[in-house]
Image (tube, helix red, strand yellow):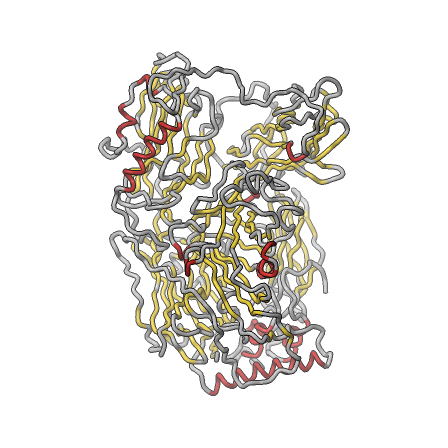
Amino acid sequence: MMTEHKGNSSAHLAHGGRQALRVGLLAVALLVLVWGLLGAGLLDGRLAPSISSAAEPETVHFQEGLNSYAGTTDTYINRWFPDTSYGWYNTMSVRAADYMSSLVRFDLSSIPNSATVISATLQLWCTGTGGQTVDASAFRVVRPWSESLATWNAADASVFWGTAGCNSTTTDRLPDPETMVVLSAASRWYEWAIPNMVQAWIANPANNQGVILRGSGEHFVQFSFASSEYWSLDLRPRLSVRYVDGPLSTATSTATATGTFTPTPTSTSFQTFTATPTGTVPTSTHTPTPTATPTGGPGNVEIRIVPDSRTALLNEMFTLDVMVLAPSGPVDSSSVYINFDPAVLQVVDGGGAPTNAIVPDATSLPILLLNQVNNGTGRIDYVAGAALPPAAPPSGYFRVATIRFKAVATAPGGTPVTFSFGAPRQTMTLYAGLNNLGSHTDGVVFVSASTATATATGTVPTATPTHTATHTLTPTNTATPTTPAATATWTATATATSTGQPTATRTSTPIGPTPGTVSLYLDPSPRVATVNEIFTLEIRVNASSQAVDSGAIYIDFDPTFLRVVDVAGNPVASIIPADPFSVVLENVVNNTFGTINYQAGIPSGPACNGVCTVATIRFKALVPTASTPLIFHSTVPRRTRMVLGGINQNTNTPLGSVVIGGSPANTATPTATTPASTATPTRTPTATSTGQPTATPTQTLAAPGGVSIALEPGLKIVTVGQTFDLTVRINAGTQPLDGAQVYVNVDPAVFQVVNVIPDLSRFADIVSPASWDNALGHIGYAAGLLAGPAPTGSFNIATLRLQAIAPAGGSLIRFAFHPPLRDTKVAYQGAQWRPTSVDAIVLVSASGPVATATPTNTPTPTATPTLGAPSGTLTGRVILEGRSDHSGALVTIGSRSALTAANGTFTIAGVPVGLYTVRASRVPYLYADKSGVVITNGATTALPDVGLYGGDCNSDGIVDVADMVMVGMAWQATPADPAWNPAADINGDGIVDLVDLLIIGSNHERTAPTAWAIF
């Protein structure tokens, strides 16, 4: 049984007794009262019927490798590499703008088809993040797919997706997601509630094609999750299903007061997910040992900060979980009081702004009674209880809540995050009113400054690398192209070297508070080459003092002197991956601006604990120079770093360099070595481009899905003020085309259109001249061929010339499909259809390298306008149900917000130009959202009035019995009473009474977000 004592603004759970009985009886009486009112028709609303069944509810957990379960299939699909399968990888990824999506399926045949699902939760462990937030939505998949063969283009070897990326809402997946979760940090669990999907899968196993997680949001970043092949069994994907065998029946509306709220445990086959540290921790300044809790509780329950040791960089956001280990009995409530140093840490929301609440866990203890953060004093007060019967209280290993911190000052010696046990802030876990907490584990956070900028510190000692075979090649062999067979030779050597190092067993526990030095360098450096010579540099990591399992590497080079090429010297858009870092997450080369973006990790086995090769760069020397530098970029968003278990390590990045002499070492055509031989090359490649599709027209119409239109390059990095080009390219395959109409949308707050340049080489007739609107960010163009053979294959139809006017972490430039006026289509002989589209992402930095080469056809403007950051103003009014004072509602648009005045009005100035979703919220009300709000430069956007519905006392997005319990706990209380809780005083009249209860009854089961309208 759960009781509550409150004093001032704090509250805690205490031992049972008469007070507990009084509160329990009061809550039951309130339930009876409301049900009676409903029966009499006095409340405009309804309460959820209680659940009854002949069978007891059962909870099962599916996780690959645990309890001999082997029914998980998962993979991810990647738009950048549309024909690559990742089913064997030990991680899977979700990236914004629908560039990477994860597919997961569980075999649920052990659950009877007659079962009725009460709840179902998909849980994924995040192994890495790009540092911003991504919205990950869960869609039910309806097309069968193969774990080993699924790609962006195809679901199986011979079956393509209806729309690439599993994006057909008729044949691939359902159109609407069942749930959405905001991804914000690594090294933590994320949960998606998917009971409807699971119910459909259990009822008809043939319908079980799993779930796809698709990313969206304004930040073009990527999150990685442990897959079913992950090395730690405890961190693999898991699905928790609570069900009863048979249908649920609805109880009558006559509730019986039983005197207490003591939950009855059910027969639950709960797998205890422990995370026992087994890895070797460097020089220890913090030993996470469970400490006997001074309350002297009768049980053996332990409460923990997880991870108990966390390393963070200054200004980094990260999360800590409050976990409970209850191995031998249930817990029906928990009172958590935590102290932290506010000079070092601040509790923040997903956007990094200070907040007054932590993140509840709606699965284990969903009834929220208190959630309060004071960032001024460094205190967290959190109280939550288990769901009401027939739901069973949790046991085993479960999460109570999640704390999202931001490191605001350095603490190299560690700053503690500790539980409080002094009255009135006494941390406890309870069951049936008795404190059963026996021990606790505090946490510590080590905050270091950002990784130092790379400086020229000299080359790495030559004795450090172990792969010496590469450096003994003759100059002739240096220019010889490397074949896959040759690559495999040195890869095997690198793998053997890595695995020969003594490594500890890896677990999910962070590597420790004081990571050793990791050096990332180019080998050899300096490299001496001659003009036109093709040579390789290896990216190597010296991890002898600190193991690593992945890395993000960003290199800048001068394209005047160097170019990344293939074996024949042709420019390429990627570098060469290497074992053991064979899971490639990003591999993009821009030879125009001289940038290399590369992310990779180790798919399985031990981490690199010595000298390992991460990747190989093949350069061609272009122009003589005494020395040209190769610099590891060290600032966001291109911050070079090596990682272990999702934790960034301190990474030293010495400068690399290349010296280019004036005389070519070898002017002969580079030769290609056959895979079976390492002897003198015998086959010389010709310049014939045999890989290009032929332009022979055919009168047979191909399937419309065989034509695609793309903006190239798909990923571009520019700086503010820079003018750049994107090419509109059609890939028609064997399908002839005689026309196309193209509509493109850009963000006018980030880009301005300078020109649209037609390409008349294939479509020689302009049907509709190019036009653009820089206020709306719209571009339109149509062209075709009125006479002559219709082109096939790949060809360009136009070039978009844009100017970046504001920074953007990743702005999507996309084709528009909005009939009837702006609908991108291709045509042949009167037939029209929509092609598959590939959009572009442009990252705009505030400052950086400026391209030295200017396209010859770029018109020189007579004057360059100085463009400030365009912005506008938002106004409106929020009405709070049941109140005459409408102040205190928070209205948020993008990164800006304001509080309403007493009459409910608000004004937000300085909002950047763009398209937004606006949110209005206030405790204890359901929040409301309005999407499609357009802010234009220099203008005021006035929103219609909105009314917020009352009753969501615990801010979980639904008005339900849990809110009624909160009102019951504070019944008849006023601000002077110990039991006072302002969240229970819904109408704000200073007393918790029947009026507040009636508001809950009238809005029962209403959920957020509500419509942007008046009641």
The residue sitting at the bottom extreme is 18
Question: Going by the image, does 350 lie left or right of 903?
Answer: left
The residue sitting at the left extreme is 463
Question: Going by the image, does 203 lie left or right of 945?
Answer: left
Q: How many dots with numbers? A: 0
Query: Is any part of residue 844 visible from this angle?
Result: no
Does residue 272 lie above or below 467 as drawn? below
Does residue 703 lie above or below 220 as drawn? above
Q: Which residue is at a point 34% across and 64% down the rendered structure image? A: 442
Viewer-nearest residue: 671 or 975: 671
Viewer-nearest residue: 323 or 349: 323
Residue 161: name its quadrant: top right
Does residue 589 lie above or below 32 as drawn? above
Query: Is any part of residue 143 visible from this angle?
Result: yes
Image location of residue 323, percent across then percent down: 41, 65
Image location of residue 259, percent across then percent down: 53, 86
Viewer-nearest residue: 847 or 984: 984
Q: Which residue is at a point 30% across and 69% down the rendered structure image? A: 291
Q: Which residue is at a point 56% across and 18% down the rendered structure image? A: 856
For the C terminus, give its image quadrant.
bottom right
Viewer-nearest residue: 341 or 676: 676
Does residue 21 lie above or below 66 as drawn? below
Image location of residue 836, percent across then percent down: 64, 36
Question: Going by the image, does 1004 lie left or right of 588?
Answer: right
Image location of residue 681, percent across then percent down: 37, 17
